[in-house]
Amino acid sequence: MENIAAGMVSEYTYDVQSWGKVKKGHTQFADGDVAFAKISPCFENRKSMMLYNLPNGIGGGTTELIVLRQPLMCQAYTFWFVSQESFIRGSSATYSGTVGQQRISMNYVKNHPVPLPPLSEQQRIVDRIERLFAKLDEATEKAQSVVDGFESRKAAILSKAFAGELTSHWRDSHTAIPNTMLEDIRRFSTKWPQKDQKLLDNQQQNSDAMIMSNGHVWIKCTIGAVGRVTNGSTPSRKVPEFWNGPIPWISSGEVQNNIINSTNEYITQGGFNNSSVKILPIGTVLIAMIGEGKTRWQSSVLNIEATINQNIAAIIIDHGLINPYFIWYWFQLNYTRNREKGAGSGPQALNCQRVRELDFFVPSLNEQNAIIDILNSLMMKEYQVKEAAEEVLNKIETMKKSILARAFRGQLGTNDPAEESAIELLKQVLRQTPTRS
C-alpha cells in the first residue's frame, strides 16, 4: 500500500497526499505532536493545534510551524502550556524579521523552562483546565449571542419606529394638524442657490401622503425633497500649508454611524480657499459614498461645523423642519438596502443624485421629536446591554489567561502528595533523543 500522509490545507482541514510529496518542503509531524505558528500575527492569535488521527499517523504542513514532540508527556498538557499568555508574550518578544513576516526565536522555544509534574498530575491539570474552560465557553456563547444579536434588535426597533408603531400612543393623545412640511421647506429654499431650488422642486413632485392613526399624516418623499445634498473636496496634500489649521475636515472613514464632535484632520484657511470644501452647519447628516468593507453607506450627524471630502454626501437641513437624527436613524435602518444602490465597477460608489433619490418618510416635526426621544431611550438600553456582554467576554478571556497561568504554577489544586516525584519522568524525558519523521 502506498505510504500516505496528511498535508495540512487550513486550520481545520487537510489533504491526503503521498508521503514522497509531503516530506519535501514541508514541516513534518506525527500523531501526538503539538504544533503552533511561529510567524506574526498568527502566533499571538494562538494558532496552535494538537495532532492526532492522521492517516498513517504522519503528516506535513507549512514551514511556518514549530512542532513539539514530547512522547513522555501528556499532549494536551503541552498544548495548553504553549497557549498560555506568558509563553505567547515571552516568545513574541523575540520576534525578528520584517513587519508582517516576523518569526519567534527557535532558541527561545527550545530553552523555555517547562514545569514537569508526574504524568497523572499532568492529566489532572488538563482535566481541570478543560472543565473550567467548558463552563466559561458556555458563558461565552451566551454573552456572544447578546453581542451578535445587537444589530437585529436594533433593526427591529428602527423598523417599528419608521412604521409608526413607537408613536401610536403619542398620535392618539395629540390632535392632528396639517403636515405642510414640503411647502414650508420650499418657501425656505428661496434663500438657497437657484440650482438647489430646482433640484428640490424636482424631488418634491413625486411626494405622497400617508394617513396614520388619529388623522396624523406622514409624507412619502425622497431625501432630496427635504434638504440640499452636496459633497466636499480634499485640499492638495502636496501643499503642507493647506493642512493642520483650525478648520475641521472629515474623511469618509470617520463616518461610522456616529455623532461627530471632533475630526482627525484640520485644514487651514488657505486650504479652504484653494479647494471646493464648504463649511457645513451643525445638524448636517453625512453619508459615506465610497469605501471598503462596511464604510460605504454608514452615516453621521455633525455636532460641530466642519468640512468634508469628496467621498461624503452631506444633507443640509438648515430650515429646522427636519430633526437630523430622524434622517440618521432612517439611514441606519436602510444601511444594507442602500449599499446596493452603488454604481460602477470595483468598490461600488454612490453619488449626490442617488442620495437625493433615496426614499424617505417624514411625519410632523413634533412626531419626529417624539420618535427620536423614544429611539434614544431604547438604543441607550441596547448599547448598555451590548457593552455589558462585551465586558463579560473580556472578563472571560482574562479568567482563561489566569486559569492557564495558575495551572502551570501548580495552583489549581491538582497536586497529590502521595504520588511519586516527577524526577524519574524527567530522567526519561532527558534520555529521549528527538527524531524527525
Image (cartoon, rainbow, N blue to C red):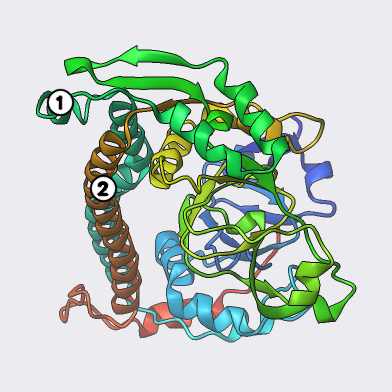
Residue 350 appears at what percent x and percent y? 70, 35
Depth check: give the residue in front, 7 or 313: 313
Could you tell whether 153 is left or right of 315 in the image? left
Residue type marked 1: Thr
Q: Residue at x 58, y 31 (%)?
A: 224
Q: Where is residue 343, by image quadrant?
A: top right
Residue sitting nearer the eye, 47 or 81: 47
Q: Is residue 251 above or below residue 267?
A: above
Q: Quadrant of the C terminus?
A: bottom right
Q: Nearer the viewer, residue 142 or 15?
A: 142
Figure check: 284 above or below 244:
above
**Spatial CA span between label 1 and label 2:** 32 Å
**Can you tell which mark lies on residue 232?**
none
Mark 2 neighbour class, 10 Å CA radius: few under 14, some 14 to 19, many 20 or more: some
Q: Amino acid at mark 2?
A: Glu
Apparent side of residue 115 relative to residue 338 in the rendered image (left or right): left
Looking at the image, is 425 positioned above or below residue 2? below
- Using the image, tell me which numbered label, if any, was put on residue 175: 1
At horizontal 73% and vertical 77% (from top left) the residue drawn is 268
Q: Earlier in the sequence, mark 1 or mark 2?
A: 1
Question: Which residue is the site of mark 2?
Answer: 382
- On the question of residue 350 being in view, the answer is no
Residue 113 pos. (x, y %): 49, 86
In-front residue for pair 281/345: 281
| Picture residue at 52% right of the left edge, 70% below the top | 262
* Tags 1 and 2 touching, CB below 8 Å: no
